[in-house]
Image (cartoon, helix red, strand yellow):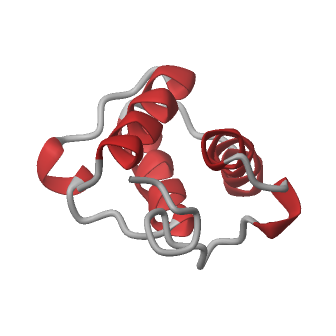
Amino acid sequence: MELEAVELIMAVEEEFMIEIPDSIAERIVSVGELSTVVETEMSRLNRVQDGAAVFRRIADIAAIFAREDRAGVRPETRLIEDLGLK
């Protein structure tokens, strides 16, 4: 996984106060997958949140990292190919 994508995942972990196992983080390709992983980890910690709110916050963070317009970040948006995270 590229360094900027790893940094994005670390920022998301910090935002939601969770830890995503490296074995899972290495397979995350899209913003939607990252959102699903965050929801799963939060659920595992009995900290359930609205999935749409989780996605919106992750999309905000991803847009900042990629210097992109937030409106262009969708669940299918790929971290490396679409956002250009290196």
73 or 44: nearer the viewer = 73
Q: Quadrant of residue 4?
A: top left
Q: Residue furthest left?
A: 23
Residue 11 at x, y percent in the picture? 49, 28
As drawn, is 25 to the left or to the right of 57? left
- Residue at the bottom extreme? 76
Q: Considering depth in this image, is 60 or 35 the residue closer to the camera?
A: 60
Question: Could you say where residue 62 lies in the image, as x and y percent from the top left?
Answer: 62, 47
Residue occupying image coordinates x 71% and y 71%: 74
Task: Measuring from the top left, give residue 20's x and y in whole percent.
Answer: 29, 39
Question: What residue do we see at 28% from left, 52% from top?
Answer: 2
Rendered residue at 82%/54% (across/down): 70
Q: State the image coordinates of residue 28 (x, y, percent, origin top left).
A: 33, 63
Q: Residue at x 47, y 39 (%)?
A: 8
Is 40 located above or below residue 73 in the figure? above
Side (left or right) of 51 relative to 15: right
Is 42 located above or below residue 54 in the figure? above
Considering depth in this image, is 27 or 43 the residue closer to the camera?
Answer: 27
Image quarter where the N terminus lies is: bottom left
Is residue 67 found left or right of 5 in the rendered image?
Answer: right
Q: Left or right: where does residue 64 sit relative to residue 36? A: right
